[in-house]
Image: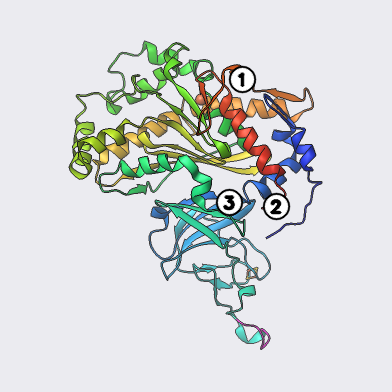
Amino acid sequence: MIEPHALDIPTADDIRGLVRPDHVHRRAYADPAVFQLEQERIFGRLWIYVAHESQVKKPGDFVRTRLGGHEVLVTRGEDEKINVLINRCPHRGARLCMVDQGTSRLFSCPYHAWVFKPDGSLSSVPHRQSYPASFDLNDPINHMQRIKQIQTYRGFIFATLNENPAPLLNHLGAMTEVIDNLVDRAPDGEVEMGESYFSVEYRGNWKLHMENAADIFHPSFVHASSVMPARKAPANASILDQDQTREMLLANGFGFKEWEGIQLNGLPGGHAYMTNIYSNGVLVQKEADTIATQYRAALVAKVGEERTAEILGMNRFNNIVYPNLIINAQYQQMRVATPIAVDRTLVRIYCFRLKGAPDEMFHRSVRFLTTLGSPASMIFSDDIEMLERCQQGLSKDEGPWVDFSRGFDSDRRDANGMLSGAASEMPMRVQFQAWLNYLTAEAA
Ligand code: FES
Ligand SMILES: [Fe+2]
C-alpha cells in the first residue's frame, strides 16, 4: 500500500537536520511533508494499537480508527477472526462506514449499495445482471482491502501496514509489563473496555500530546487554577467520589520537592514511563476503603498474597507505548492519540473493567477519567490549551528551535534505556531519537 507522494518528502538528511541532542526544529511539528513521512514511516511501519478484543467480541462487532493515514475498520468476522479493513468501497472509493463503533452483520455502501461482510468480502451487488459476465463477487479486487499484519498481545490488537514487520513483542519490549499489569489486576485475569469513551480533538501536532504525558514539570503551573480551589475545599468536599477528585487536583500542586522520588524511564523505540509517582501521595488508597479491601481480597483469593502485593505494587504512571498509546494500569485507563493532520490530533480516553473486581472499581476509574481526561476536565482542558498554544507558536517562522535541554547533563543510562529525575526532559529526547531513527530508515 504505497502512496504516491503529494508533497516533497524530506530526505533523511533533511530530517537529521531537524533533531539535535537537546533541540528540535519547529518543522517537526508544523511541516505537512514531515507529517506525511511520519504517516508512512511511523504510523505505517510500526505496530499501531487499533482496538481491544473486548470491543469486537462477537461477529459483526466493529471499531473505526486509523492506521498510517488510512481510515480502517477493525471487525470480528463470522469465522470469529479479527480483520483490519480499509474503510473504502472498492467500487468507486466511497467511505463505507461513518460510525465509530457498533455491530453490523453487513456493511452496505451508501452510494450504489455494494454489500460487504465483516471480513471485507463482497456479499452482493444490486442488479447483478448489468455487470459483465466476468464480474466475480469472489475476486479480491472487489473486496475491501485487508491489512495483512495483525498481532494481539493480551487482548490489545495491533496492526501495521509493514508487510514484513519484526514481531510485535520486539516493538513493545519492556512495555509488555504495563499491559500485563493492567490485565493481571483483574481477579478473573481479563479486562473489558467500557462501552463508552471520551473523545477530544485538539488543534495541535500529535507529538505535543505524547510529550505532555511525560512532562512532570508542568502540572504545578498549568493546573494551578484547579489546585487552588482544591486546597481551599474542606476534606469531605467531594463525598460522592470518596474525595477522589479533590485528591487528584491536589496532586497537581506538588512542588519539586514532592516529585523528588520520581524516576523517569526512557526506552529504545521511544517508549517512556514514570515510576514511584503517587506511591505515598494523596492518591494512595486508604486502608479503611472497603471497596479497595474487597477488591484486594478477590485478587488474593485468585493469585495469593505475594502475587497480589506485586501486582498492586506497580505504580508506573503514564506508560507511553510509542507512538500513540498511554496506559495507566492502576487507574484502569488508556489514552490513544491519533494524528489527523499536522496540526490536528484526536485523543480517545478509555476505562477498563477488571473482571472479578467490584463494579465500584470501574466507577472510580470513570470518575478519575472525568477529573483528569474528559473534554470538560479541569486538568486535560488546561493541557489542551497549552498544546494548541505551542502549535500556534510553532506554525510560524518566528524562531526555528524548540528546547529540550532540561536535565540533559544528569541523564543516566542503564541496561534498559535512559533514566532521569522528574524535572528532566529526557523522555522527549528519547522520543525524538526514536522519531529520527524511524524517519531516516529507508526500508521497512
Ligand atoms: S461507491 Fe460503493 S457501491 Fe458504488
Ligand atoms: Fe497536564
The reply to whether residue 205 is in sight is no
The quarter holding residue 393 reads: top right
Between discs 2 and 3, the one toward the N terminus: 3
Label 2 element class: loop
Label 3 element class: strand
Indicate the amino acid at tag 3: Arg
Mark 2 — residue?
443
Q: Is residue 232 left or right of residue 1?
A: left
Main secondary-structure element of the magenta-colored stretch: loop
Calculate the distance from the C-alpha at mark 3 to the C-alpha at mark 1. Answer: 35 Å
In the picture, the disc for residue 408 is: 1
Indicate the amino acid at tag 1: Phe
The x and y percentages for residue 439 are 69, 43
**Residue sitting at x 77%, y 33%:** 17
Q: Is residue 16 left or right of residue 170?
A: right
Between discs 1 and 2, the one toward the N terminus: 1
**Residue sitting at x 29%, y 44%:** 186
The x and y percentages for residue 176 are 44, 43
Calculate the distance from the C-alpha at mark 1 to the C-alpha at mark 2. Answer: 31 Å
Mark 3 — residue?
66
Closer to the observer: label 3 or label 1?
A: 1
Indicate the amino acid at tag 2: Ala
Compared with 254, 367 (above or below) is below
In the picture, the disc for residue 61 is: none
Between discs 3 and 1, the one toward the N terminus: 3
Label 1 element class: helix
Dot 3 and dot 1 residues touching (CB under 8 Å): no
Is 436 in the magenta? no
Residue extent of the magenta highlight: 131-136
Q: Tag 3: Cα neighbours inside 10 Å, few (<14), some, or many (≥20)?
A: many
287 and 133: which one is in front?
287
Q: Which residue is at the far front?
A: 415
